[in-house]
Image (cartoon, rainbow, N blue to C red):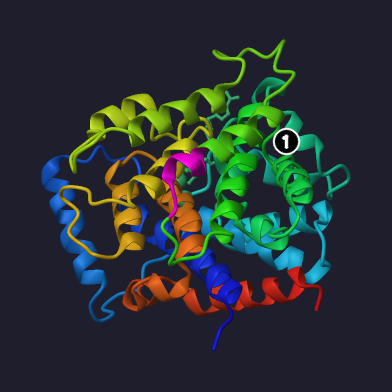
Amino acid sequence: DLSLFAKKFRGSFLGVLTGDCLGSPYENEKLTSGMRLVLQKSFDTMEGPVYKVIQYTDDSAMTKSVAESLIEKKDLDLKDLAMKFVKSYYLEPNRGYGSGVVTVFQKLRGSKFADVLLPAKEQFNGGGSFGNGAAMRVAPISMFCYNNYDKLIELAQKQSLLTHTHKIGVDGAILQAMAIQQSLHIHPEEQFNVIEFVDQLLNKMKFVEIDEEGLDLIEAQPYTAQLKLVKNLLLEEGDDNPTHQKVIKLLGNDISGLRSVPTAIFCFLRAQKPISGINTDNPYRRALQYAISLGGDADTIGSMTGAIAGALYGIDKIPPNIIHHCEASDEFCQLADNLLDIANGL
Ligand code: 8NA
Ligand code: MG
Ligand code: MG
Ligand code: MG
């Protein structure tokens, strides 16, 4: 029998994988209500016998590297992680990486990893990437630091700097890491308050989003502002509220950290209650299907939602056939188990 945390670690890892795999066919799509019906049918099919295995993309590939490096080095070793990212990219370059991050991989390899932090700093004329790439791969950090909040913040930030140095890219990873850690510490049978979940994140982000002056940001505390919107949207009543259109307009569904990480947190929390057009009793599936139904960066938002939801519910609540429809699911289970051993200092 697996321990509670073993189930939760597996759940979060398989959350990353299932969200990525099931979301990838919808990446860059704007879903009509007809397509959301197709999505419902496709999820129904995925809960049935395995008839095909869906490939994972960059989200899972990079998460896998983070996990493997933490397991091997028993700590965050930036040079080792940079080498693992680059090796994984050159072995399988067609996993759907962001167009900017490929430049980082080329420079890392070209410079023989002389200064692993330099290529990321040079991105976008020195501004750094604000993409969600550092957030989408952060789940193993939440697990490695599941009992240590200060270390969680430190390592979530550090691992970001290999590819994303823009404050939006880094803080998105920190926020996603916090959300996963919070979920790990909620009992799956517990009735928890979704507003309190957001309030806890708001209290923590207050201390992360300081000293923003001088940055060319619309808001001084942009993630805090988005989390307040998440709260307001969660307070709306009715199965068909808020509308997809409203969520996409206010929270976003794109490749930036700012307009995808709070969206994933919202999807996870909104799915605690029924959502019209999503016919399932399983809250994990509801969260995943809802996240993907928003379209846009569907694999990454699906994957981040899956990581948070899986950390709460654990692997027992993820429909087994959905797991088996995804490439490398056994390997992801094994990584979760190994990471728990490392996190517990074994
Ligand atoms: P990234 O660092 O390359 O950023 C992604 C994109 O965001 C860049 O290519 C730019 O277009 C834009 N961007 C980021 N920072 C800036 C900036 N400072 N100024 C102007 N533009 C900027 O990649 P990432 O690792 O953050 O990945 C983010 C997303 O890209 C993920 O969803 C990932 O899956 C991937 N993606 C791939 C496809 C695809 O077609 N395969 C489609 C969408 C997203
Ligand atoms: Mg992807
Ligand atoms: Mg990744
Ligand atoms: Mg994506």
Label 1 packing within 10 angstroms: few (<14), some (14-19), many (20+):
many
Say how many tags the image has: 1
Whole-percent x and y of residue 111? 83, 44
Quadrant of the rendered structure where residue 1 is? bottom right
**Residue depicted at x 46% and y 31%:** 259
Boundaries of the magenta span: 192-198
**Residue depicted at x 26% and y 78%:** 51
Q: Which amino acid is tagged 1?
A: Ala
- Is 194 one of the magenta-colored residues? yes
For residue 13, above or below residue 316: above
Question: Is any atom of residue 94 visible in this view?
Answer: no
Q: Which residue is mark 1?
A: 120
Whole-percent x and y of residue 118? 81, 35
**Residue depicted at x 23% and y 77%:** 48
- Name, please, the residue furthest toward the left: 34
- Is 201 one of the magenta-colored residues? no
**Residue depicted at x 36% and y 67%:** 54
| Quarter of the picture holding the C terminus | bottom right
- Name, please, the residue furthest toward the bottom: 1
Q: Secondary structure at mark 1?
A: helix
In the image shown, does 261 or 104 lie closer to the viewer? Answer: 261
For residue 130, above or below residue 337: above
